[in-house]
Amino acid sequence: MTSAKVEVQDLDLFYGDFKALKQIDFSLSRREVAALIGPSGCGKSTFIRTLNRMNDLIPSCRITGKVLLDGEDIYGRLDVTELRTRVGMVFQKPNPFNMSIFDNVAYGRKMQGVRNRRKLEELVEMSLAKAALWDEVKDRLKMPALSLSGGQQQRLCIARSISMEPEIILMDEPTSALDPIATGKIEELMGELKKDYSIIIVTHAMHQAARVSDRTAFFLLGEIVEYGDTKALFTNPRDKRTEDYISGRFG
Ligand SMILES: Nc1ncnc2c1ncn2[C@@H]1O[C@H](COP(=O)(O)OP(=O)(O)O)[C@@H](O)[C@H]1O
Ligand SMILES: [Mg+2]
């Protein structure tokens, strides 16, 4: 039995004949933040997509090995819709729906059949507050989400994810399209969110990994070269390739 929130065992992933992930082992506990770093094309996005089965949408994609959520194999009998509720995802480019701020956050629960206005209002306020956006938008919840700034849109997408009360939030380079101030807000938010959720964030900004995460995995050519305590990995890497990468010698 495992006590990890998510545990990946000996995972290989193929796109057709191309092996994009090789023998991945990974685990993360409740209320921890993991950062995934590594040069582009090394499999970071591919890896986080395996954690909520987004790769199912790619016909050529095939995996072997195990991905366990609370000890249960997500490629087994677990319902995919339930899985995506439990494992939320925030993308690189903010992708709010073309509807009001309120409706963006209420959407998922409405789809599940929640109709009670009061309940939805509470849900929207709670989610926006947790995403550190409530104060900025509480007086204009009916405005189109697309009228918000990029940084606000990304926090809205985080609120939308939170509204489903996920257990894990996956974030694929969530700040790479944002300015430094918006980036700072999202980084700050991460510290709050981890009180409730496990977070896995892909970033190619190493200082961001160092600031926000408890554990860091260094990916290279489809493998995890090294995975461990963030401070230890950055100050005292075990592998020469990790050392070269974090000291800026390649990537
Ligand atoms: N849908 C796909 N079909 C085929 N190959 C893919 C697909 N998505 C990614 N790849 C390949 O898999 C490798 C890893 O890509 P990716 O996971 O996007 O890396 P990263 O996120 O680290 O930049 C790359 O060689 C990429 O070209
Ligand atoms: Mg990527």
Image (spheres, rainbow, N blue to C red):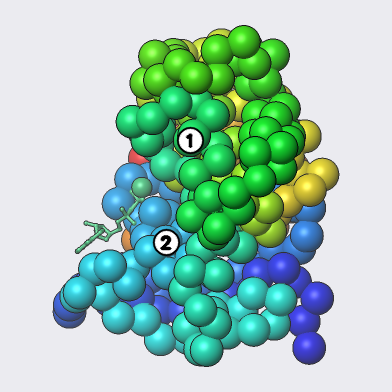
Residue 8: percent from left, percent from top: 58, 75
Specify the amino acid type for callout 1: Asn
Q: Is residue 91 left or right of residue 109?
A: left
* Camera-nearest residue between 187 and 98: 98
Q: Is residue 143 left or right of residue 227?
A: left
* Camera-nearest residue between 134 and 1: 134
User: Which circle marks residue 18 in the picture?
Assistant: none
The residue that mark 2 highlights is: 49
Which callout, 1 or 2, points to the residue nearer the camera?
A: 1
Residue at 33% across, 31% down: 98
Residue at 60% across, 36% down: 159
In the rendered image, the residue lying farthest to the front is 116
**Label 1 packing within 10 angstroms: few (<14), some (14-19), many (20+):** many
The residue that mark 1 highlights is: 104
**Spatial distance from mark 1 to mark 2, Cα to Cα?**
22 Å
Specify the amino acid type for callout 2: Arg
The correct choice, above or below, for 237 with respect to 133 in the image is: below
Label 2 near ligand 1 (CB < 8 Å): yes
Residue at 54% across, 29% down: 102
